[in-house]
Amino acid sequence: MGSEARPFFAPVPKASGWRLFLKTVVARAYPRVVGQQRERSWIFFDVFLSILAVSAYVFVYRAIGAPEEYVGFVVVGGAMTAFWLNVLWSMSSQLYWEKESGNLALYIMAPNSMMAILLGMALGGIIATALRAAAILLVGSLIFHVQYAVENLPALVVVFILTLAALYGLGMMSASLFLLWGREAWHLANLAQEPIYLLSGFYFPVKNLGFWVAVGASIIPLTLGLDAMRQLLFPSGAALGFLTVPVEVVVLAVLCVLFLVAARWLLGYMERIAIRKGRLLESRR
Amino acid sequence: MSADLAIETQNLGRIYTIRNRRERRIRKEVVALRDVNLQIPRGELFGLLGPNGAGKTTLIKILTTLLAPTTGWARVAGFDVVREPHKIRPRINMVSGGEASGYGLLTVRENLWMFAQFYGLPSREANRRIEELLRRIGLADRIHTKSSDLSTGLRQKMNIVRGFLTDPEILFLDEPTLGLDVNAARDVRRFIREWMDAHPDRTVLLTTHYMVEADELCDRVAIISQGRVLACDSPEALKRRLQRDALFDIEITAPNGLTSSMLEALPGVRKAVLTDADGGARLSLILAADSALPGVIHVLTERAVQVRHLTKREPTLEDVFVELVGRPLAEEEVADGQ
């Protein structure tokens, strides 16, 4: 062993505090931003299949002579569906999958913040999904000749960012909930997928559901986010809108704070339960 | 607690409460660990030897702040595992056998870099260490391979590197060679030994149910069974306990109703273990002296059992385990499984 008996490497100062937090966010975002692009099948599953669903609604609307704006509504809804699916399958269910693979115990045991792990998952999910959503929007708009009339771009950007922040806040919160409740996380995800398509008005103006149903559906940030974006993207959007854009912005901001605070609290609760009861971290390998 | 102790436990215990799935009011308590007292100095490679279900993983989970004890206390690097987990976590790391951590779509380097970031290691230093450790463990040529494309053995080598990458003061290795082929297991053991030689101030707590691994690697070994530590000493000292005994392995034909207890009733026979072997059986004996052997042979002859082969040998950790637990480790695991 002789020459090998020197230390493998010298100790170095390690990041702590907010620098460790940021490093963790970036590191956890990495598998989603880089890793997920390596599976080329996403082009088929995430773009082509979404365009098929959008096409079905477009043909129905055109067949019944609905206003042409509805085609644009459907394409925008189709693009935002990518974010909902990402939140559902890659955020809400994620801690469950992390537990099964053994990553969750390593995350808890590391000196970083679990909130940084979740934020990294969210950030990575947003970046990776934005590519898919943009592809759906572009292809859908080209195929169906969608005309946009953006008069207030800053407002549109604010609504988009707030919608994603609130939506991924919901995902971060439900990640702990799914882990605490569900041994079979995919059943919960399945349960939430289709009803939200309907309630959030992915393919039609949510106003059509009636006031109280739309109010109830507003707990899902995509409901108001989509409604506000449609109002800002299409000339007749305001007439078909559920609430005014400023009101929807305020509600989205409140949801954003609410979900992020709840996510933080639930993470702490989940970790305490896991450590006290001992079963939550056990995978079934 | 002495500053030289990496790990210290006092009357440490853990009871799991299990609810009946159908009748949730019905609860059952399972004692996974009871009254464990350990003192592990810094710089020691300490082994926990025991069958599956003995409490090894429970102990590791408590020491890595992933599980709260129900009785007693434990300190790691001088900090209490319940009250000060945030002070312990930057100082430790853990690798478990058969773990599938990381992400299959990422390469070996990317996975390791990601985990290094969670400990605040600068990226450049992380990449330098990754290359160095992969070279030493014999995985350098797979640095750009997606981890989903690695075999079990290679993946476990990557996991081992993950544990050492952050240069932890105390490293927990939970069955690190579980399921590995002979060569991969040997590489991993050699790597651990080299690490300890090069970093004499670092501590490793290793659990295993492989006797050879404990014997070859560990400075001291605690034998654990059914949640209790039965003995704790260096492998040599543990084996010396049996040095004055005479140990024999006898290969016999079909036992014809012969049982271990019949032999243990004979004067001078301290322990007899009968196991199935190719076309017959194998009898492992711990005798107080050579003079007890004729009595055993006499019983075999009475039952028309023929002796095929007889060997006198030096004690192993397996013998120590049998002496302490009353049956071989393999049997203990089968019994636990039932």
Image (spheres, rainbow, N blue to C red):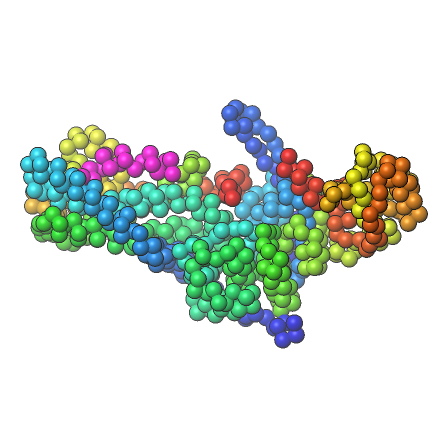
Q: Where's residue B158, x and y in %?
A: 51, 59
Q: Is residue B260 left or right of residue A103?
A: right
A2 and B17: which is toward the camera: A2
Residue B170 inside the magenta-drawn segment = no
Q: Where's residue B222, x and y in %?
A: 71, 50
Q: How many marks?
A: 0
As displayed, is residue A50 above or below residue A35?
above
Q: Residue at x 68, y 46 (%)?
A: B50
Q: Is residue A181 visible?
A: yes
Q: Residue at x 80, y 46 (%)?
A: B251
Question: Which quadrant, please, contains the N terminus of chain A?
Answer: bottom right
Q: Where's residue B84, x and y in %?
A: 55, 50
Residue A188 inside the magenta-drawn segment = yes
Q: Residue at x 25, y 41 (%)?
A: A221
Q: Residue at x 58, y 54 (%)?
A: B180
A53 and A272: which is toward the camera: A53
The rendered magenta stretch, by its main secondary structure, is classed as helix
Q: Where's residue B199, x and y in %?
A: 62, 67
Q: Is residue B236 left or right of residue B153?
A: right
B133 and A161: which is toward the camera: B133
Task: Tell me where the magenta segment starts and ends, as one range.
Answer: A186-203
* Residue furthest bottom in the image: A3
